Image (cartoon, rainbow, N blue to C red):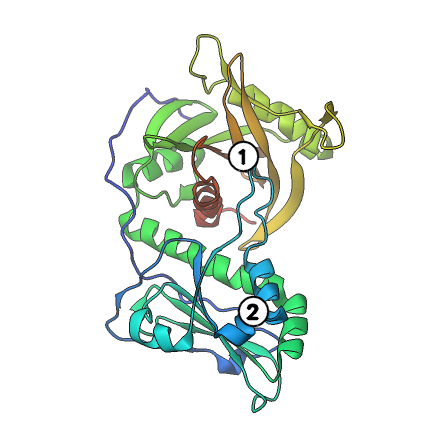
Amino acid sequence: MTTFVKRKFFLMKKLLKATFIVVMLCFLGSCDSFRSLTGAKKTAQGSPYEVLVVCDGREWESALGEELRATLETPVEMLNQVEPMFNVVRITARDFKHLLPSYRNILKVLCSPEVKEASIVAQYDVVASPQIVLTFQGPSTAVMVEYLKQNGASLLQVLEMAERNRTIEYAKKQGAKALQKIVREEFDMDMVIPNGYIFRAESDDFLWLSNEYPVASQGFFIYTHPFKGKASITTEALVKVRNEFAKRIPGPSEGSYMTTVKRIPNVEDDGYIDFLPQRKVVKIDGREWIELRGFWEVERDFMGGPFVSYTTLDEREGELITLDCYVYSPKYGKRNFLRALEHLVYGITFPNNKN
């Protein structure tokens, strides 16, 4: 790897709304129900991870409404505070028609005996862009509740995909080109980075970038380390390496630095229990990544928050490469900050490298 002199870039301001790649998720084989409308569109309204549910009072107050709320407001995993997957804004069909047809995420609920079976159909950019409109219909609330219990995870997935693709498409068009060049030169890796991030530090095997807000910090660091077989990709081994590189991220007081939380409070008593990050393998464009979700803290100071890391094998160099993302937001929600960081791994490619 080439060693670079430290540098700092002051980049352009926050995200502009833009169109995104049309994607879809088919529910129970309903591929033929999908359609994508084209033409000039107004800019979609609403905030990220906010869903406008168009549902009349009778259904909303029934078991169907309860199941919808439980699904959409499923707590985000591994946050050190309770936050829902999506914020729900509910409106009646009559009010929706006149007021809010250009919302970014819309879920229309239709319960009618004329409908033969339950289904969810996706449409994109119907009257605004970027927009997803889901129509959830069925012959009765009981049938729709059962359908949602079986397919709730798919509903969350397609909404998450829409949010993710918005972020990636924006960054492709309005991204931090200078930082993307540094990543390419340092790691021989293409990465889509949104505007707002600034250069913090680097060495031969390490790069740290962050997006600083008045009341929060959203950052990530990339590092490489030797691959020595299966022993180097256990959760314990990955955490050990993470801590070695996290020490390079200083805390607010002299001698303080980032590390991984290894003990958490025991909800059953006043003590503590050992803790390892949550682990799973995800496949993105044919490449396997080891995902770790956990919590970080600052040694010798009082700071902390959630992190998520993604590790994969770079076969060209025979080494592991990790994208490690963290959020510090003590006063406000962490979900949107962390989700935006998670999207970064979907914009990574390795030129001339087999997956």
- Who's the residue at 53% across and 55% down the image? 285
In this view, the residue farthest toward the bottom is: 114
- The one of 303 and 242 positioned closer to us in this rendering: 303
Residue furthest toward the top? 254
Q: Nearer the viewer, residue 55 or 132?
A: 55
Q: Nearer the viewer, mark 1 or mark 2?
A: 2
Could you say which disc has been placed on residue 56 in the image? none
Q: Quadrant of residue 259?
A: top right
**Is residue 189 visible in this depiction of the protein?**
yes
Q: At 37% across and 78% down in the image, what residue appears?
A: 94
Quarter of the image that includes the N terminus: top left
Q: Earlier in the sequence, mark 1 or mark 2?
A: 2
The residue at which mark 2 appears reads as: 61
Residue drawn at (35%, 73%), measured in percent from left and top? 95
Query: Can residue 228 be spotted in the picture?
Result: no
User: How many residues crowd mark 2 within 10 Å: few (<14), some (14–19), many (20+)?
Assistant: few
The number of callouts visible is: 2
Q: Amino acid at mark 1?
A: Phe
- Distance CA(mark 1)–CA(mark 2): 37 Å
Q: Where does residue 229 sit, x and y in percent of width and height?
A: 70, 33
* In this picture, residue 213 sits left or right of residue 57: left
Residue 273 at what x, y percent from top left? 74, 26
Q: Is residue 331 above or below residue 21?
A: above
Residue at x 49%, y 22% (from the top left corner): 303
Q: Residues within 10 Å of mark 1 (few under 14, many from 20)?
A: many
Residue 187 percent location from the top left of the image: 44, 34
With respect to residue 210, does 53 lie above or below? below
Question: SS of the residue at dot 1?
Answer: strand
Provide the residue designation for mark 1: 307
Asked whether disc 1 touches disc 2, contact meaning CB atoms under 8 Å apart, the reply is no
